[in-house]
Each structure stands twice: as C-alpha cells, then as structure tokens.
Image (cartoon, helix red, strand yellow):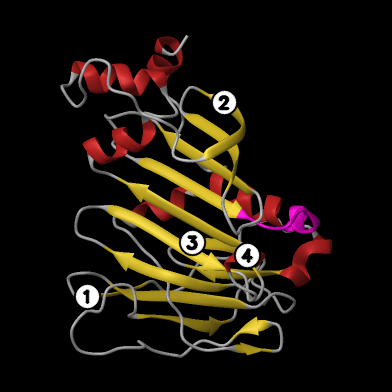
C-alpha cells in the first residue's frame, strides 16, 4: 500500500450509487445518505482536474477526489493539492483512472467502489468491482493497526510471527494458522512481504500481496486484485501502484527469518 495512504487509520469500503456514463462511473456529488452514520454508505467521489508535475492538466485520464464519513460521523476528505506522481504506460492510459485519497492512486477505468467503512479500531479496507460485477474483476486493500489482529492475519504467511505470538501469549502451543485461501503460488520478496496467487469461487484468478513489518510498527497491509488473464497488463500496473511504496523490512526481521 502506498506510503501516502498511511494517514488513513481505519477500515474503508466504498459503496457507490449510480451507473455508468459511457465507460466511466457516474458518481453522486455528495453523501448518499444523511443523518446517522450508515456503515460504508456515506461517501462521494468528486470529478476533479489532475495535474502532472509541470502543472499541466491531465486530459486523457479521468480523475476523482474521494470523501467519506467515518464511524464517528466525521466527514473525511482531502483536497487534491499534489501533482500526479505516477508513471503510467501510454498504452494503458485509456484503461485507467486516477483517484485521490490523501495521494494519487490508479484504478481500472469504469470500476466502481463496492463498500467503504472506517472503523474506530484502526482497520482499513477498500473494495472496487468491475462494471460487470465480481466475476469480471475486483480489488480489495486494507490496513490493520491493532497488534493482535495484525499478527493473527500475518501468522499464516510468516513463521516468525507465529513464534512471536506464542512468546506473547497471543497463541497456544501447537495452534495452527492455516492459509485463508487456496494458494496456487507464493513468493517472498523479503522477510516482511509475501506475494501470492489464489483461487476464489466465481472470480478470475487473484493476485495478492501482504506486508507486515513487525509489531513495533503495528501495521499490516494487504492488497488483492482479480482480473481476467487478458487484462493482466492493467492488473499489474494497478497492483504495482498499490504495493511498491511499503515500509522497509527491518534488518532484525530479515535476520530472524533465516
């Protein structure tokens, strides 16, 4: 998850009303619901003009600013006062859009948010789906800050975390932490990161990333994305944008994992 996202401490899921105008989402310019907070439903994406580092407007990619209401009822929205700092392959620009929520992010053009929720217990989640629905593509990203929750979700992927949980009495001797998905391939770029592919019923193949730098930082980041194989170039561009700016893996964890 990009470093600029870390000002968000919570769970976010996007649920949009509205249809499609041409091949792009049509968003209601304001909260869908008013009054009491209705989990995940109070939000807006406002069409805006994005600018490149030279200050010139970007005209070949639609851009939106995201706002939402948190579980305390407060409206959270940040002005898009930064230039777009993302390198987008020219051949993919007509298939992508820009979304600003504290920093610029790439999304597949025409995809619609599915759920948005910001909770008080420091858990974050965002979901988008393709216009054709879940079976045509989706993405989900999130962050957990609570120590027990983050370690529990990291434990199936990182043997070191299982040892740490046992030492902290967060787990019982012999307790198992099975993988939550039917994993078909898995790689470890470093001791804090796993990239893997898994199978989900009714979905294209899923490409996923999990990053946990340790309890001292207390942050677990995840990103899952599914698209048909024909859309792999778009998937890879969005996946890289959401996962490359991670926290460095501390040397102590690198050594302990060997």
Q: Nearer the viewer, mark 4 or mark 2?
A: 4
Residue under label 4:
135
Name which of mark 1 and mark 2 comes first in the sequence. Answer: 1
Q: Nearer the viewer, residue 40 or 174?
A: 174
Determine whether the residue tagged by mark 1 lies in a helix, strand or loop. loop
Within 10 Å of disc 4 (Cα), the crowding (few <14, some 14-19, many 20+) is some
Q: x and y percent of residue 148 in the render?
A: 22, 36
Magenta stretch: helix, strand or loop mostly: helix
Determine whether the residue tagged by mark 4 lies in a helix, strand or loop. helix
- Where is 94 relative to 218, above or below? below
- The answer to whether residue 188 is left or right of residue 213 is right
Q: x and y percent of residue 231 in the render?
A: 76, 58
- Where is 176 relative to 150, above or below? above
Name which of mark 3 and mark 1 comes first in the sequence. Answer: 1
| Distance between the alpha carbons at the discs numbered 4 and 3 | 29 Å
- The answer to whether residue 114 is left or right of residue 130 is left
Determine whether the residue tagged by mark 2 lies in a helix, strand or loop. strand
Q: Nearer the viewer, residue 205 or 225?
A: 205
Q: Nearer the viewer, mark 4 or mark 1?
A: 4
Identify the residue shown where x is 20% and y is 21%.
Answer: 172
Residue under label 3:
103
- Name the quadrant containing residue 243: top right
Residue under label 2:
188
| Magenta span | 226-234
């Amino acid at each position: 998850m990009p470093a600029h996202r870390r000002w968000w401490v919570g769970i976010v899921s996007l649920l949009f009303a509205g249809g499609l105008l041409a091949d792009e989402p049509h968003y209601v310019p304001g909260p869908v619901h008013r009054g009491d907070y209705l989990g995940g439903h109070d939000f807006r994406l406002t069409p805006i003009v994005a600018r490149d580092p030279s200050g010139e407007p970007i005209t070949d990619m639609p851009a939106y600013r995201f706002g939402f209401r948190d579980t305390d009822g407060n409206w959270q929205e940040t002005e898009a006062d930064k230039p777009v700092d993302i390198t987008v392959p020219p051949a993919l620009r007509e298939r992508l859009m820009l979304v600003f929520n504290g920093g610029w992010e790439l999304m597949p053009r025409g995809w619609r948010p599915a759920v948005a929720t910001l909770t008080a217990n420091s858990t974050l989640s965002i979901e988008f789906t393709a216009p054709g629905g879940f079976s045509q593509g989706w993405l989900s990203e999130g962050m957990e800050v609570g120590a027990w929750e983050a370690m529990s979700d990291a434990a199936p992927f990182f043997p070191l975390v299982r040892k740490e949980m046992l030492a902290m009495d967060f787990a019982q001797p012999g307790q198992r932490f099975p993988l939550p998905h039917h994993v078909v391939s898995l790689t470890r770029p470093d001791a804090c990161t796993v990239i893997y592919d898994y199978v989900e019923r009714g979905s294209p193949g899923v490409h996923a990333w999990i990053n946990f730098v340790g309890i001292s930082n207390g942050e677990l980041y995840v990103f899952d994305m599914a698209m048909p194989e024909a859309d792999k170039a778009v998937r890879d561009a969005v996946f890289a944008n959401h996962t490359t700016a991670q926290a460095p893996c501390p040397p102590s964890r690198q050594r302990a994992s060997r």
